[in-house]
Amino acid sequence: MTTAYAEGVIGALDEARSPIVRAVGLSKWLGGRPVLRGVDLTVGTSQCVALLGANGAGKSTLLRILSTLTRPTAGRLELFGLDATRAGALLRARIGVIGHQLMLYRELTVRENLELFGRLYGLGHVGARVGEVLGLVGLESRAEDRVRELSRGLAQRVSIGRALMHRPELLLADEPFTGLDTESAERLESIVRGHRAGGGSVVLATHDAAQAARLADRVAVLRGGRIALHEPAGGHDPDALAACSRSLA
């Protein structure tokens, strides 16, 4: 066995054993002030971690770091067993992001947007995958509508579809239920459960403690850029979890 081959095998085994996310001591300073301070977080395969906390607690900044769109000021981040600061471009192909911005082209149709992002990710059989995603987000009948013609809630569904086009292993969702009606919210909860059932992992920022209790294995409450509480979600009543989140805000 050659040295290069052996190193490759060892690296593959290490990645298989590694958590999807391992963050140690993550800190981020913006404009001369700390936004995150010494955050530790681990997310395993098929796990969902919900981030709770007041506005400005650091949830969105943490998700941006996990997405490799911004670097931490200090600390270490590994994704899929790889150093995120060195392998960002490679890792982004394995991550789906649902953010406050839709990241869609308003003048293109729903189908055209999904086709475009499928090609950007180098997918084969893009048309077939677009059909699957349209069914997943319930937009088959609106596929030929331009995004600018859609309500905010429907456009959010397109954005969710965009994030799922390349079958990401890690889904990062920043307040993804914003603007969704009851039907759309229930559909998204089903998508999150299906993603986990297929072996995917999720980090979800939300203000809704009931959703966190329903969807997540663990809940992390951020306060002032630090994780003030990190516990299994199953042992918490949603009302008690919401009260705890407010008391730590």
Image (cartoon, rainbow, N blue to C red):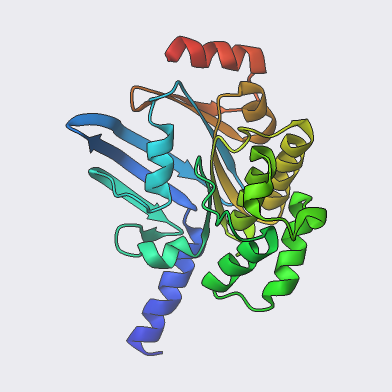
Q: Nearer the viewer, residue 148 or 155?
A: 148
Q: Find residue 34 and report its horizontal and vertical position in percent.
A: 24, 30
Front residue of this view, candidates 133 and 235: 133
Splitting the image into 4 quarters, where does residue 74 fall? top left
- The residue at the point 41 percent across, 71 percent down is 11
User: Is residue 241 or residue 90 the one in the foreground?
Assistant: 90
In percent of width and height, residue 236 lies at 63, 19
Query: For this view, does 10 lie left or right of residue 209?
Result: left
The percent position of residue 73, horizontal first and vertical second, equals 23, 43
Quarter the C terminus occupies: top left
Residue 123 lies, with reference to residue 198, above or below; the image says: below
Left or right: 96 as drawn, with respect to 57 = right
Residue extending furthest toward the right: 141
Residue for point 39% across, 39% down: 62
174 relative to 224, above or below: below
> Measured along the vertical axis of the image, is residue 226 above or below residue 70?
above
Residue 116 position within the rendered picture, expressed as x and y whole percent measured from the top left: 58, 68
Q: Is residue 233 above or below residue 43?
A: above
Residue 175 shows up from this direction = yes
Quadrant position of residue 29:
top left
